[in-house]
Amino acid sequence: MTANLLETCMKELRLRGFRLTPQRMVVLRVLHEAHGHLTPIEICERAQEMLPGLTEPTVYRTLNFLHEQRLALAAHVGSGQLVYETGERDHHHLVCRKCGATHEIPHDLLEALFSQFQHKTGYQIDGMHVTFFGLCPGCQDHQ
Amino acid sequence: MTANLLETCMKELRLRGFRLTPQRMVVLRVLHEAHGHLTPIEICERAQEMLPGLTEPTVYRTLNFLHEQRLALAAHVGSGQLVYETGERDHHHLVCRKCGATHEIPHDLLEALFSQFQHKTGYQIDGMHVTFFGLCPGCQDHQ
DNA sequence: AATACTATTGCAAGTAGTTACAATAGTATT
DNA sequence: AATACTATTGTAACTACTTGCAATAGTATT
Ligand SMILES: [Mn+2]
Ligand SMILES: [Mn+2]
Ligand SMILES: [Zn+2]
Ligand SMILES: [Zn+2]
């Protein structure tokens, strides 16, 4: 299943006329084998184990590239660092400003809202993986 | 008008038990005198003109601090750098992934949507200044 | 299989942002 | 006005991320 999606990504890159380098393949593999968010540094460490000699700038460039190509999601979830993930599950994030609790919200739960939003603005919103900050139910009580 | 809001911010800090240092005052002044978003570096440059000797780490720490205290807004609008602004106008951002066009959307236009969103999730969403990415009407046409 | 084309990489150096810790300076108290 | 308390700052060093450029290596063509 994961292998399948990985293959699809790589085929897609070739289809769009980009080169399929070992560096790109290994970064994609790290993303696809991970569950949840990874920082560039975590990705770098894991990718370098699989492909010794791989350098930091290449990993950063590859992550930017995959994001531009919409084969990876990126998000700011309050840690200061950007985190990456495959686009497997359409979702957004809800982070509590006080206790830091982080929840994933399936996109389809907000589908209707996003449609209205698109309609109001005229934009075709395609940035899944938006992060919203606020107070979780627990932290609302204690003021 | 701007001066007034600035005063209020400073009083608020004292009220919350924080010290009112020249460093903090000058960073607040820069934010309040600016129209629109500023990067930390722009803020640093302007603040250092007003207060020679002010250092970079202090500016970064002050911006984090003001953001935590909710006296400054921060946003990622796609430039890679975090940008700051006063909380004068409640709004969000709509950025076109293709041409980069950036629009401000008044929050009250989305008030109803946000209410529904809060209701669905149980969170009290208070992070104004959310950035949504998508395709602007112009870029949707040309595929 | 060899060649040509050029996208992509690694290297080295640069910029942006953070942190530990000792010195400084706001504020409350006298 | 002087003193004490400690939050906040500057310094120096560090980590995170980016960029210019020459070398490398995918891909298409022969
Ligand atoms: Mn996610
Ligand atoms: Mn703004
Ligand atoms: Zn909470
Ligand atoms: Zn556009």
Image (cartoon, coloured by chain):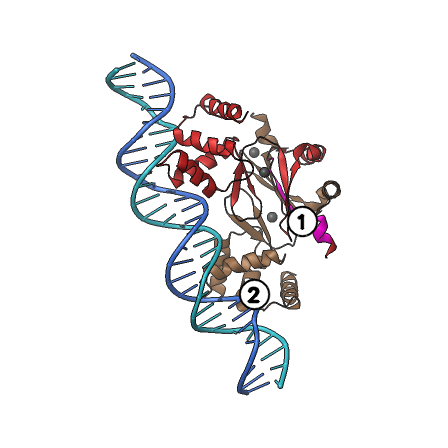
Chain colours: A red, B brown, C cyan, D blue
Query: How many callouts does the rendering have?
Result: 2
Choose top left, top right, bottom left or bottom right for residue A14.
top left
Amino acid type, label 1: Gly
Amino acid type, label 2: Met
**On the rendered structure, is B119 left or right of B30?**
right
Q: Residues within 10 Å of mark 2 (few under 14, many from 20)?
A: some
Q: Residue at x 52, y 43 (%)?
A: A82
Highlighted range, magenta: A126-140
Choose top left, top right, bottom left or bottom right for residue D30.
top left
Residue B49 seen anywhere in this rendered image of the structure: yes
Q: CA distance from mark 1 to mark 2?
A: 27 Å
The image shows residue B43 at horizontal and vertical percentages of 51, 56
Q: Residue at x 53, y 52 (%)?
A: B38
Q: Secondary structure at mark 1?
A: strand
Between tags 1 and 2, which lies in front? 1
Residue named by callout 1: A134
Choose top left, top right, bottom left or bottom right for residue B13.
bottom right
Instruction: Name the subunit of mark 2.
Output: B
Quadrant for ligand 1 reads top right
The image shows residue A107 at horizontal and vertical percentages of 66, 34
A123 w.r.t. B86: above or below: above
Q: Residue at x 69, y 36 (%)?
A: A117
The image shows residue B56 at horizontal and vertical percentages of 46, 59
B124 w.r.t. C28: above or below: above
Q: Residue at x 44, y 38 (%)?
A: A46
B132 w.r.t. D1: above or below: above
Residue named by callout 2: B25
Q: Secondary structure at mark 2?
A: helix
* Quarter the N terminus of chain B occupies: bottom right
Q: Residues within 10 Å of mark 1 (few under 14, many from 20)?
A: many
